Amino acid sequence: MKKVLSDNNINMKTRKKLMEACVRSRLAYGTQACFPKEKQMRKLESCWVQHLRYMVKGGWARQPTPEGVEEECYKYLYRNREIEEIVGTMPLPYFIEKQHLKYIAHICRSPNNSITKKLLFAEASKQYYRDPWICIAKLLHMSTDQAKASTQSRSGFTELLRHLYGEEDSTL
């Protein structure tokens, strides 16, 4: 796979589609149901950008050390966001957030007797219960009541995600 992704004779769009289909789907597997913590998200993003660097010619190149400086410069020539722009892909955290929100909205539209919906809307019975709607509302930039209401309409929620994350992803 590394040979195919780093082969400059293959069109970048083709390699990007292959990368998103094979690598991103494996990295993001299961994150729609269980949203990763910040440390886990950094590890996933690090792995994602590492794969993207293989795709870009000079992706692993370092900046030259300025003259007269004793310490060596270890900065990459391209920053992570620049690498994502060159390849033309969405940052992995945005993709994971979007997938998570779409999954939550799917659960909210399911029948009321669905076990996953009952668990999502369960009342706190334990002292240290963590309400999942707080995280969801934070991702949507709205209150928890607004988040619960916005997930009920499929078309309205799709428009909200397009507004938040842009239309560059074709998986809507």
Image (cartoon, grey):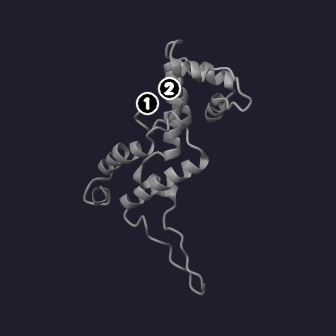
Amino acid bearing label 1:
Leu
Q: Position of residue 171 (x, y in %)?
A: 41, 33
Q: Is residue 92 visible?
A: yes
The residue that mark 1 highlights is 172
Amino acid bearing label 2:
Thr
Foreground: 135 or 130? 130
Please identify the quadrant where the C terminus is shown: top left
Q: Is residue 76 above or below residue 50?
A: below
Who's the residue at 51% across and 37% down the image? 166
Q: Position of residue 17 (x, y in %)?
A: 33, 45
Secondary structure of the residue carrying numbered label 1: loop
Foreground: 127 or 18? 127
Who's the residue at 61% across and 31% down the image? 136
Q: Is residue 130 above or below residue 51?
A: above
Cβ atoms under marks 1 and 2 closer than 8 Å: yes
Q: Position of residue 55 (x, y in %)?
A: 36, 58
Secondary structure of the residue carrying numbered label 2: helix
Mark 1: few, some, or many residues within 10 Å (few <14, many ≥20)? few
Numbered badge on residue 4: none
The residue that mark 2 highlights is 158
Q: Residue furthest right?
A: 127
